[in-house]
Image (spheres, grey):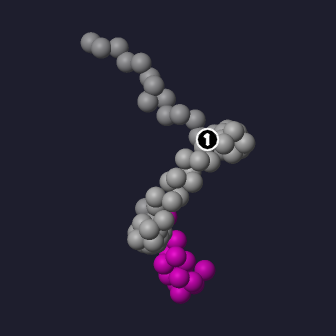
Amino acid sequence: MDNRNKNISQKYNEGEGNRTAAREYNQSQQRFVRSGQVDNKARKAERDIRSDDIRRELEHAETIGRRHAADEDPEVTRPYKKD
């Protein structure tokens, strides 16, 4: 890879702590809040969670997602002896 291609690659690959993605996400969230849809979406979510069919579907999706998640950090639950 020549230096020109390397510079282009580095420009778009920010790795962990991707500031561009964080800025875009924050701007998107701000647009949503300003849109005035927050209360309506919250009420719809509350209705959805009360629906047995939708709640089961959400619980199933969560179960599938948890299968792909990394294991819990052992430091979180490790019992330590006090001196």
x and y percentages locating residue 63 in the rendered image? 67, 38
Residue projecting furthest to the bottom: 4
Q: Nearer the viewer, residue 72 or 55?
A: 55
Q: Which residue is mark 1?
A: 50
**Numbered range of the magenta stretch:** 1-15
Identify the secondary structure beneath mark 1. helix
In the rendered image, the vertical position of residue 45 relative to residue 63, given as above or below: below
Residue projecting furthest to the left: 83
x and y percentages locating residue 70 in the rendered image? 59, 40
Residue 9 within the magenta-colored segment of the rendering: yes
In the rendered image, the vertical position of residue 39 relative to residue 60, given as above or below: below
Disc tally is 1
- Residue visible at 30% across and 14% down? 82
Task: Say which quadrant the C terminus sits in.
Answer: top left
Q: Is the magenta region chiefly helix, strand or loop? A: helix
x and y percentages locating residue 79 in the rendered image? 41, 18
Q: Nearer the viewer, residue 8 or 34?
A: 34
Residue 4 within the magenta-colored segment of the rendering: yes
x and y percentages locating residue 13 in the rendered image? 52, 71
Q: Is residue 55 left or right of residue 16?
A: right
Task: Say which quadrant the N terminus sits in.
Answer: bottom right
- Residue visible at 53% across and 34% down? 72
Residue 41 in view in this figure: yes
In the rendered image, the vertical position of residue 23 relative to residue 45, given as above or below: below
Residue 68 in view in this figure: no
Amino acid at the residue labelled 1: Arg
- Dot 1 alpha-carbon crowd within 10 angstroms: few under 14, some 14 to 19, many 20 or more: few
